[in-house]
Amino acid sequence: MVQGLIDPRDTLERQNEKLLKIAATLMRRVEQDTDSSGLAYAQFERAALLEEEVRNRTRDLERTLDLLNLSNAKLAEANRETEAARANLTNAIEAVQEGFALFNAQDVLVMCNSRFGMHMPDLRDQLQPGLRFDAYVTLVSQNPALALPPGTTAADWALRRMTRHQDRSVMFNVRLHGDLWMQISEHRTPDGGTVILQTDVTDIMRLQHQERERLLDDQARLIRATLEHLNQGVCIFDTQRRLLGWNRLLGDLLAIPVGRFRLGSRFETILIRLREDFDFAGNITANEVETWAKQDGHRPALTFDIQNPAGRVLTVFMQDMPDGGFVISFTDVTQERQSARAMSEAKETLEQRVLERTLELEDALAEAERANASKSRFVAAASHDLLQPLSAAKLFVSALDGELPTGAPRDTLQKAANALDSVETLLEALLDISRLDSGRAQVHLAPVDLNHLLQQLMEEMRPMAESKGLRLRLRPTDHAVLSDITYLRRILQNLLSNALRHTQTGGVLVGARATRNGLRLEIWDTGSGIAEADQTRIFGEFQRLNATASAADGMGLGLAIVDRACALLGHPLSLRSRLGRGTVFAVDLPRAGNPQPSPPPRHAERSGEPLSKLIVLLVEADTDLREALSLTMEQWGMDVLACANPAEAQSLIDEIGLPPDVMVADIPPTECPATARAMAALQDKHAPLPLCLISAGRGPQTQAVARQLNVPLLAKPLNPEHLRRFLVAQSPRAIP
Amino acid sequence: MTTRSATAAAPVSGTPRAANPSLSSLAAASGQIVRTGFAPAHAPDAVDQLAQALHPVADLDLVVLFVSPEADVAQVIASATERFGPAQVVGCTTAGEIGATGYTDGEIIAIGLPRSHFASRILRIEDLSAYDPQAMIDAMIQNRTEMTRTHSEWAGEFALLMVDGLSMREDTLTADLAPGLGPVPLFGGSAGDGTDFASTHVLFDGNARQNAAVVVQVRSSCGIRVFNTDHLRPTQQRMVVTGANPAQRQVHEINAEPAAREYARLLGKDPEQLTSFTFAAHPVVVRIGGKHHVRAIRKVADNGDLMFFSAIDEGVVLTLAQSQDMVGHLSTALSDLTRQQTPDIILTCDCVLRRIEAQQKQLSPQISALLASHRAVGFCTYGEQVNSMHVNQTLTGVAIYPPTELTTTTAEEKAWSRA
């Protein structure tokens, strides 16, 4: 590589010298120690050395520049778009009909369109971006175009406006001078800014006003028509009692020409008119009415009547109106009042007539009763008086019977005796009737052994039946019924004889059957039957269906007696009949349990049936009680030995020499054991001698004594029934 | 053999793209996009002939003239400027032309760039001794930005430099221009004066100027590929410049011996018989960063100094180089430019030393045939410029490819894809 640097023909010195120079040159070169004259080569060298790198760098730079340019282009585009968007926004905002303003979150105006601040042209210059919201409000509040509400200052308005501004969404109307209206709405933007829209609503507001006025007109017409339609006179007054409205009927009712009514007429004027023409009825005066009308605040509704000399009556109704005025209605009630009066008068007349009639009827009734009583008395007296001579006649006839020989005279006598019997029967019947009619008949209800009673009747009737060739049968019953045996016997007797009398063939059956409430006794016959039309009539007095029947068969009083007796006893009587087949009479009777072993029924003491005659030793210290008990037991048919104490009793027994059947002793609580012991001694002495103790003491001691003696103890006040039951139990025979 | 192809404008970045279909079809109809005209230097109607060849001149954006020094250069540029206006007319004198049939002499070569495919801006450097590099850079950047804006859809770019070949300012100029180029590849040639080395001219604004230069910044819808190649190979033979006058590109001493004598000794030749042919056949190169760059020797001074075509300095190690198969190399280089797409035209700056060598080796016909077959036109230079460097004894130029519809990528899209 370096061989060529030296010329081998040179001397070594020369070679050395050259090499040294070459080396020195190279060193200078390496050290870049060249003067500026070598700049061109240096530039070349640098270019050659760095070209690639420079070019690469340059390319990179170019790329970077491209990117930068691109970014710049995009930035420019973005800027352009932003500008376009801003322009679009501005145009859009400008295009809307409303005033538009945007305040940012710091309440500073960002932008607004030219309609913002409409109707306040002098405000336009100040509505520039950067304007604060409060400054804007102040400007508006002080603007002469703003119509401040009455009593509101600009500062008040601004304050209220700022308060509204704090709301999230705001919408209100603002009135401007010149009857201009703006609707302001505020909306919060998502970033806390505020959008304000101002809409000119003047036209809408004016339309609304017109509409409202039109509506009011319509309403007024409606009210007018309604008022005229009312069948009342109506007038309306305001708070100052001035006439606001009325209808035509008012003039008619008050007899005031309608022309007199003027809008604004004073209530007092009308009241004067009323005073002159009408009387104030009731408890109200014209002055009170006036006071009511002048009263402030809530007034209770007022109603009263007024009447004019012609007799016209008006009901006046005065009532508050919501606005503080009042309304008065006049209703013509003349007709109603007259009707009411007529009704009232009619009622009074009617009452008087009823009273009079009632008195008349009472008189009639009393008269009838008197007549009836006198009739009954007459019948009773007559019957009784008739019976005496009749008995005498019968005695004479029977006396004569023995003296007459058989033959015709004797037959005639027999007929006379029969006639007398008939008269007697008739008289007895009449007596019964009169007794039943008089209401003075004594009824003694008691258990009745129906079977026993019927057996007796069967025996009595059998001859009559046999004489007519009729069968008479009884279906036995073992029930007892509660009734008065005397009347019951008569009822059944009459029914049986009636059945036999009206039956020509066949027979009569008597039977009883249980019903829900008791027993139904039925008498069946196979007679001719009773037509339905006659079924009521037959119970009347002296009614006989078969006129051909002989007088001996009855005077037609039997069924009348049955009817009256059943009514008296409360036994329903019924009748079923089929013409040509027969008739069934039925009497419903209450059941009385088993009459044979049972204690006497509740009213047995009044039945009049005597107890078995017993000797009763009564020991009673109290004199009054002793006499009362004695009387009671004597009424029961007892023989009473009354003593004050056991000792007296013993001496009495000894004196009579006959022991009593039963002893009844009152044991005073104070001497309980002693008396009891004395009585027990008496009992033992004359054993067997039933004893019954009576005591006012209810203590355990008395009861213990009774238990000890094994005798019944009756508590005071003494129930006579209990005593009677005890006595019955001691009777050797049962009460029938 | 070393083939160097400038990669500054790779086919990818310079992929042609039609501005619009109508222009594209117009180009197709006319057959060729870049128009060329040839006229004898002495012909009085040379300019007319050229105008006729470039017809229609009205749609030309730029006309470049390579004028034989035999012509009345001043007159040619004046009339051409008038004739081709409003197209800009620039040019330079030559050390021989490359015309329709390859190497030629005594001709005027005109190259017309139609406005349909090209836009250009002219940067004038009227005095190479006194110019403001920064103003120059600013102007270039502005020009380029302007064209980027006006023809943003065109992706092809290159710069053409024509500089006074005797100014000895080329190295400095290219270095000063470099910042203004950006990524745009630059190629150019130093104006020649035949083999006389008397006066060289750069033509612009209707004038022929000395100690001047002109830079044409071109933007095009066509594909652009700038290339730079030589057929030399360094040997082991080194020499060290031990005495020099860099300002005059004059080497006094090599290896501490008088320069010419030492150069001759190393070649084994008689120092008295050193000629241009010797220099062409035995160039010296400097090796920088693994590459070699020819420092061509222009002549031997009377005092035995060696005069260079490019910047030189003391301490520079020169390596003797050997030329390889010139024709083969050229064929390869041209094929290389044609491989992907056939260029519309190849504008060439061919070092005069290559032409001398070809003549010496009697290879001119083959070289000319190769050049003509590839529609390579241009001129023979006193030095070539590629990007920021001034070099010697190379073939430098630009291949211009017709726009294709193949690539739809725009510069902007590329920027995005890179981003």
Image (cartoon, rainbow, N blue to C red):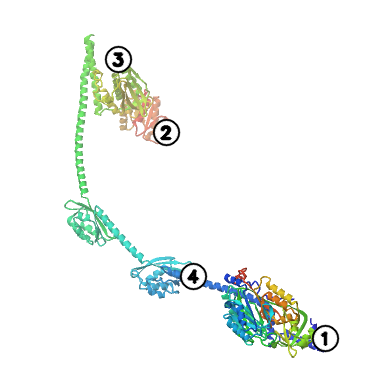
Q: Residues within 10 Å of mark 4 (few under 14, many from 20)?
A: few
| Residue A695 location (% of width, % of height) | 37, 33
Amino acid under disc 4: Ala
Residue kind at label 1, given as amino acid type: Pro
Residue at numbered disc 4: A85
Q: Earlier in the sequence, mark 1 or mark 4?
A: 1
Q: Outermost residue toward the bottom?
A: B303
Task: Point out the image quarter for the N terminus of chain B.
Answer: bottom right
Name the residue that disc number 2 marks: A704
Question: Label 1 belongs to which residue?
Answer: A8
Q: Residue furthest front?
A: B44
Letter of the chain that mark 2 sits on in the rendering: A
Q: How far from the left and from the top, in percent, is residue A87? A: 47, 71
Q: Label 3 lies in what chain? A: A
Q: Quadrant of residue A680?
A: top left
Camera-nearest residue between A617 and B2? B2
* SS type, badge 1: loop
* Lateral position of residue A538 relative to residue B390, left or right: left
CA gap, disc 1 and disc 3: 216 Å
N-terminal of the two: label 1 or label 2? 1
Ranked by sequence position, the earlier of labels 1 and 3 is 1
